Image: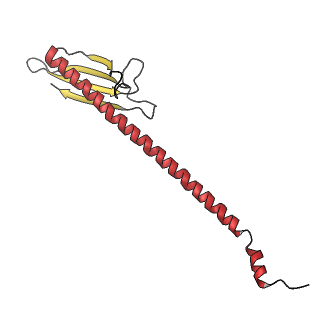
Amino acid sequence: MKPIPRILRLRTRQAGVGIVTAIFLLVVLAGLAVAMVGITTSQQASANVDLLGARAYQAARAGLEWGMFRRTRNQACDPESRFKMPDGTSLSNFSVVVTCAPQGTGDLVRYLITSTACNVPDAQGRCAAVNDNPESVRRTLEAEL
C-alpha cells in the first residue's frame, strides 16, 4: 500500500469546516436582520405615538380656546361639553371634553376651563384615564379666567 501524501492528509482533516463556518455566519446575519427589523418597527411605532400626541395636544388646545370663547363672549359656563373634531382634518379621530367650573364666591369668581382630547374615547364620548390600546393618547389643558 502506498502512503498518503501529507498535503492530502491535511485536506481530509479540514473537510467540512467551511460549511460549519458558512452556517454560523448565516445564523449570525439572520439574527442581526431580525434585530434591525425589531428596532425599526419600534421606532416607527414610537414616531406614530409622538405624532398622535401632538395632534391630541392641538385638539385639546382647540377645545380650550372654544371653552374660553364661550365663557368670555357668551357668558356661558357649561359644566361639560363633548364633541368630535371635524371630519376631513388631521384631528378628525379625536374627541374633546371641555368642562367649566366656577372657582370662588362673590365678586372674585374665576372659572377653571379644562379641555381633554383623546383618540380612543369610551362609550359616553369621554376620555378614559386608562386604556389598553397602545396607540391611545390623551392630552389635558387647563386655563383659569
**Rendering quarter of residue 89:** top left
**Rendering quarter of residue 102:** top left
Give the percent coordinates (x, y) of residue 71: 17, 18
From this view, report whether residue 79 is shown above or below residue 4. above
Q: How many marks?
A: 0
- In this rendered view, identify the residue nearer to me: 47 or 96: 47
Give the percent coordinates (x, y) of residue 39: 48, 49
From this view, report whether residue 9 is shown above or below residue 104. below
The quadrant the C terminus occupies is: top left
Q: Residue at x 19, y 17 (%)?
A: 70
Colouring scheme, one of rainbow, by chain, secondary structure, one colour: secondary structure
From this view, report whether residue 26 is shown above or below residue 46. below
Give the percent coordinates (x, y) of residue 30: 59, 54
Q: As drawn, which residue projects farthest toward the left?
A: 107
Any part of residue 15 in sight: yes
Q: Residue at x 44, y 40 (%)?
A: 45
Give the side of residue 65 with respect to residue 39, left or right: left
- In this rendered view, identify the residue nearer to me: 74 or 14: 14
Give the percent coordinates (x, y) of residue 101: 21, 20
- In this rendered view, identify the residue nearer to me: 142 or 135: 135
Q: Residue at x 33, y 31 (%)?
A: 56
Give the side of residue 37 with respect to residue 71, left or right: right
Q: Residue at x 45, y 35 (%)?
A: 134
**Rendering quarter of residue 130:** top left
Any part of residue 114 in sight: no
Give the side of residue 82 with respect to residue 136, left or right: left
Q: As drawn, which residue projects farthest toward the right?
A: 1
From this view, report whether residue 41 is shown above or below residue 133. below
The quadrant the N terminus occupies is: bottom right
